[in-house]
Image (tube, grey):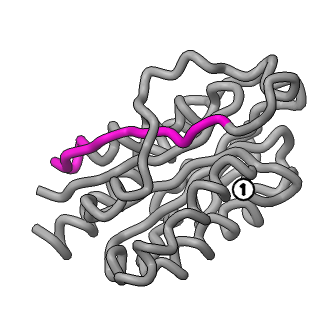
Amino acid sequence: MAKVLVLYYSSYGHIAKMAEAQAQGARDAGAQVDIKRVAETAPPEVAAGFVTDHAHPEAKVDDLAGYDAIIVGAPTRYGRMPSQMASFLDQTGGLWMKGALNGKVGGAFTSTASQHGGQETTLFSIITNLMHLGLIPVGLPYSFQAQMGVDEVKGGSPYGATTIADGNGSRQPSETELAGARFQGKHIAEIATKLFG
């Protein structure tokens, strides 16, 4: 049974919901799944409106070595991952030196305020870190066909599941977006199971 970590940072709760969907997909594939979050590092005056009541424990860097797959989710900040997730990943030098994550499976998911708010550049900012750490990135293939079409506002990218939150955070992940996250989580867990049993 593959062990999967869904690691996320969420300011307003959108990414936390997507993390739950990723985890559900991985569980549907028979994986053992943990959901953990990175610590809030923004000063109190900046984080005043952020969701702080998270149900998931804070991750420690050394936790990562115990998993066969790591799915990383974070919202965009100016077209890249936010400092909270970057700071966490910047602390993985010891794991990198040991090659502790080489050959494991990785994935990314994100949220933006608008349809063109940097979803793919944010995914790539996460994926770049995963590749440096030796993980094999797995996205959201077009076999998840619900990401196609223009019948509704929706996220989705071959590089990872996404959602659109609107500028004031009022839009929650749609069923299509959550389905994409579940699909990606299941896909990653299935690949990890093939590799690690």
Disc 1 marks which amino acid?
Answer: Met
Q: Which residue is pictured at 26% across the width and 44% down the height?
A: 33
Residue 28 at x, y = what percent? 23, 42
What segment carries the magenta color?
27-40
Q: How many numbered marks have been drawn onto this rendered protein structure?
A: 1
User: For residue 136, which quarter of the picture?
Assistant: bottom left
Q: Which residue is mark 1?
A: 81
- Measured along the vertical axis of the image, is residue 78 above or below residue 17? below
Of the pair 28 and 57, the residue shown nearer to us: 57
Q: Is residue 180 left or right of residue 63?
A: right
- Measured along the vertical axis of the image, is residue 158 above or below residue 29? below
Question: On the rendered image, what quadrant is the C terminus found in?
Answer: bottom left
Q: Which residue is pictured at 27% across the width and 59% down the height?
A: 67
Q: Residues within 10 Å of mark 1 (few under 14, many from 20)?
A: many
Residue 144 at x, y = what percent? 48, 56
Of the pair 148 and 190, the residue shown nearer to us: 190
Q: Which residue is pictured at 22% across the width and 55% down the height?
A: 3
Q: Callout 1: helix, strand or loop?
A: loop
Question: On the rendered image, what quadrant is the N terminus found in?
Answer: bottom left
Residue 83 lies in the magenta-colored region: no
Residue 30 lies in the magenta-colored region: yes
Of the pair 95 and 161, the residue shown nearer to us: 95
